[in-house]
Amino acid sequence: MTERSNSATVPRAISTAVEGYRWSRDTVGQSGASVYRLHGKPGAMHLFLKTGTGAVAADIIAEAARLRWLAEYLPVPQVVDFEAADGAAWLLMTAMPGQPACRLLEADSSTGPKVVDALAAFMRRVHAIPVEACPFENALAPRLAHARARIDAGQVDEDDFDEERLGQTAEQVWADVQAMLPLAFDRIVTHGDFTLDNLLLDGGAVVGCIDVGRAGIADRYQDLALLWTCLSEFGAGLQDRLFEQYGIDKPDPRRMAFHLLLDELF
């Protein structure tokens, strides 16, 4: 049974867990989920509630499973409670410490090298998780299938394409993706959405990562390409530094381009 709890309808168990909190809607991010920050309860830690229906609920279910698994390896939010029923899902989790990398770069551009060094070190940590221990597959075949399903369902936001692809249709981007295949990819554990919004820093190190619903076995350039393009607004020097600190002397431009193109469909 669900109940109204301040700003969202939630299952009874979650309603009990969030009793006494003040709610604030969090509009950062593009997941399509409704996200609330729960705070102001004396003596209690801050929490986040993520909820949605349909395809968004499926994403939340995927994130809950990955959070529980990743807790052994990375600083991720703890799952306080999770419920899924009748095409809807609710994920209640602890808030993480630190500041998003994007906020640090925007506040003081001189911190750029230190921030990039921390992000590269954390990316190496993610990519070092044993592949054989990972139960989640996010490699090329399922990712392409998911992209095709999103196109067919009309879920691709064509107005949100990068500048060089504005005005194109999802079908045109799909055709460009297909034209780049085949490509050689490696298989490592990736975050899947390694962006400046999803990495939290404190004291010159990454102390938390969020939005891990795409985590799984994939090509390392899935993470590298997304972070590289995020850094573009802060200068090519930081983009070059990312690869230097990660340990790649000669980045593969074709793999970079492929992952940036495919990401347009998500």
Image (cartoon, helix red, strand yellow):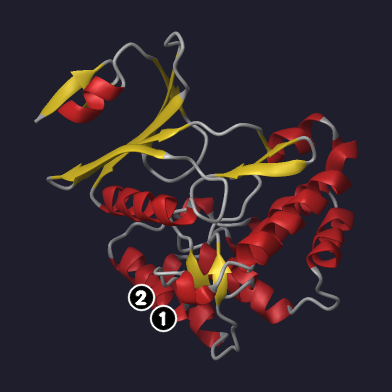
Q: In the rendering, at what x and y percent does residue 112 appear?
A: 85, 44
Q: In the rendering, at what x and y percent does residue 167 appear?
A: 53, 60
Evaluate if marks 2 and 1 touch, with contact meaning CB atoms under 8 Å apart.
Answer: yes
Label of residue 141 in the image: 1
Between 215 and 261, the one lying in front of the other is 215
Left or right: 98 in relation to 94: right
Q: Residue at x 65, y 78 (%)?
A: 255
Between 31 and 264, the one lying in front of the other is 31
Secondary structure at badge 1 equals helix
Q: Is residue 167 visible?
A: yes
The answer to whether residue 83 is above or below residue 99 is below
Q: Label 1: few (<14), some or many (≥20) within 10 Å?
A: few
Q: Which residue is disc 2 drawn over?
A: 145
C-alpha distance separating marks 2 and 1: 6 Å
Left or right: 147 in relation to 264: left
Kind of residue sitting beneath label 1: Ala
Left or right: 69 in relation to 154: right
Q: Quadrant of the N terminus?
A: top left
Quarter holding residue 137: bottom left
The answer to whether residue 194 is above or below residue 108 is below
